[in-house]
Image (cartoon, rainbow, N blue to C red):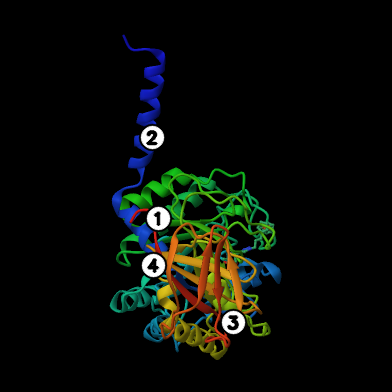
């Protein structure tokens, strides 16, 4: 006789198995790849770049749809060179690029049959920069993700409206399902015309938090078209079914200095997206560039929390990337050429990010990243394993240390080797050995 308890247990185990089976091996492998990658380049580029006031200019300057449509007819980025962008990405040491295929302005930066409001059909440029970028990324071994805005300030069927895009002069009617079908059609194009993608980075759902976004249908479409493509939603909430990465805008995982992020961290890989000044799209007056020291520090702290850094540039309207961004990316790449071993392929270390720095680990090797600490002595709590050897990552010189039940005390070099991050390597014997 089957007892009620047995039936419940059977149901629970079936549910558990179904959930595990939900994520096919290709996507689980892609998540691992993502976690190993650690560093990506975010690119915000579109019609808004022309005005040099960031990607929200249509909203912020209360532009109507027809004013913006006219602006779009003048977009002609003749100096766009996919090879130059991917060369820069490689020099910076990133493993993937995430680029805006369509931002909140609703203008498609790719060839699409779903609307004439796209870079090929609407502008004198007539080229598809995403196709050129996808080809070049494949040639140079960089994965490509497409940012895709679910929020649209231009499409008439984005109705009822959300919190933004209320002053663009659209008639007060529209059909939500038509809009959702339009998005699915564009996503189908993005997932079939550009080769294998890293995934889709969604943004803008927060504009209509209570709407039915038909996510299960859209996510199923993506998974069917490209089973290894990751879904990275920037909805500022804990992960939903079908999603692969939890991304935090302008914040380290779980932090909410931005004011709109969740502090709830799920079980998925994490990512921190970050602007290099205060803007995503090209902003000609924002000269408040972060220092390389600050950028490396965020990369290290993100890695110390087990996550990635997605560092943004907003190219200029002619298709070039301004020198302030290029210089910083080159310098980070130079740093990674020595210290990348303590970043790429690592997971969160045994000591969570602290004011002084962070720890990462690969197997039995722990990397202690001392970003800022005034003393020669640095005391760590127990690292969960016996330390066999401590050394400097650069050069490999051994380092004095002592280990007690209270933790590990390191004697740092008298002079820092690196102005950004003094990296110490701890070789440990784990309980497994
Ligand atoms: O693409 C970049 C930005 O344009 C976009 N996301 C990055 C990656 C972005 N849009 N808005 N924000 C970032 C800031 C979020 C503002 C919000 Fe709100 C505060 C969303 C919800 C609360 C104010 C009120 C704006 C919408 C509702």
Left or right of residue 102, residue 138 in this image: left
Residue 209 shows up from this direction: yes
Left or right of residue 158, residue 320 in this image: left
**Between residues 81 and 259, which one lies in front from this camera angle?**
259
Mark closer to the chain start, 3 or 2: 2
Mark closer to the chain start, 4 or 3: 3
x then y, percent, for residue 262: 62, 53
Q: Residues within 10 Å of mark 2 (few under 14, many from 20)?
A: few
Residue 299 shows up from this direction: no
The residue labelled by disc 4 is 345
Q: Classify the position of the N terminus by image quarter.
A: top left
Q: Are marks 1 and 4 in contact (CB under 8 Å)?
A: no
Left or right of residue 219, residue 149 in this image: right
Residue 293: image tag: 3
Real-space Cα distance between discs 1 and 4?
A: 35 Å
> Compared with residue 28, is residue 192 higher up or lower down, i.e. above or below?
below
The residue labelled by disc 2 is 16
Q: Residues within 10 Å of mark 4 (few under 14, many from 20)?
A: some
Q: Classify the position of the C terminus by image quarter.
A: bottom left
């Amino acid at each position: 006789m089957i007892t009620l308890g047995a039936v419940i247990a059977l149901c629970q185990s079936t549910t558990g198995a179904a959930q595990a089976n939900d994520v096919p091996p290709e996507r689980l492998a892609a998540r691992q790849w993502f976690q190993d990658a650690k560093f990506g380049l975010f690119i915000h580029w579109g019609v808004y770049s022309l005005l040099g006031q960031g990607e929200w200019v249509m909203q912020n300057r209360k532009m109507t749809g027809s004013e913006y449509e006219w602006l779009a007819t003048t977009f002609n980025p003749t100096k766009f060179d996919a090879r130059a962008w991917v060369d820069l990405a490689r020099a910076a040491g990133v493993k993937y690029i995430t680029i805006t295929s369509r931002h909140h302005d609703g203008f498609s930066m790719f060839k699409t049959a779903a609307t004439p409001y796209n870079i090929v059909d609407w502008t004198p440029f007539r080229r598809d920069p995403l196709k050129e970028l996808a080809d070049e990324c494949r040639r140079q071994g960089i994965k490509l993700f497409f940012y895709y805005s679910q929020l649209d300030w231009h499409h008439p069927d984005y109705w009822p409206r959300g919190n933004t895009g209320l002053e663009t002069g659209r008639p007060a009617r529209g059909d939500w399902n038509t809009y959702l079908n339009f998005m699915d059609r564009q996503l189908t194009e993005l997932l079939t015309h550009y080769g294998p993608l890293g995934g889709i980075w969604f943004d803008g759902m927060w504009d209509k938090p209570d709407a039915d976004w038909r996510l299960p249908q859209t996510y199923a479409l993506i998974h069917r078209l490209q089973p290894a493509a990751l879904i990275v939603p920037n909805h500022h909430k804990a992960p939903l079914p079908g999603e692969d990465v939890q991304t935090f805008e302008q914040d380290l995982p779980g932090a909410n200095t931005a004011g709109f992020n969740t502090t709830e961290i799920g079980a998925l890989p994490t990512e921190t997206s970050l602007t290099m000044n205060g803007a995503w799209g090209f902003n000609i007056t924002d000269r408040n560039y972060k220092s390389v020291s600050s950028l490396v520090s965020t990369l290290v702290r993100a890695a110390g929390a087990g996550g990635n850094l997605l560092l943004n540039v907003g190219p200029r309207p002619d298709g070039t990337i301004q020198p302030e961004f290029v210089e910083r990316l080159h310098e980070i790449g130079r740093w990674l050429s020595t210290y990348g071993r303590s970043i790429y392929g690592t997971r969160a270390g045994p000591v969570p990010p602290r004011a002084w720095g962070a720890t990462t680990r690969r197997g039995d090797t722990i990397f202690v990243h001392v970003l800022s600490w005034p003393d020669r002595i640095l005391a760590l709590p127990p690292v969960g394993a016996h330390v066999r050897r401590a050394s400097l990552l650069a050069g490999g010189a051994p380092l004095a240390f002592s280990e007690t039940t209270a933790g590990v005390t390191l004697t740092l070099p008298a002079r820092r080797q690196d102005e950004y991050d003094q990296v110490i390597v701890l070789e440990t014997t784990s309980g497994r050995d």
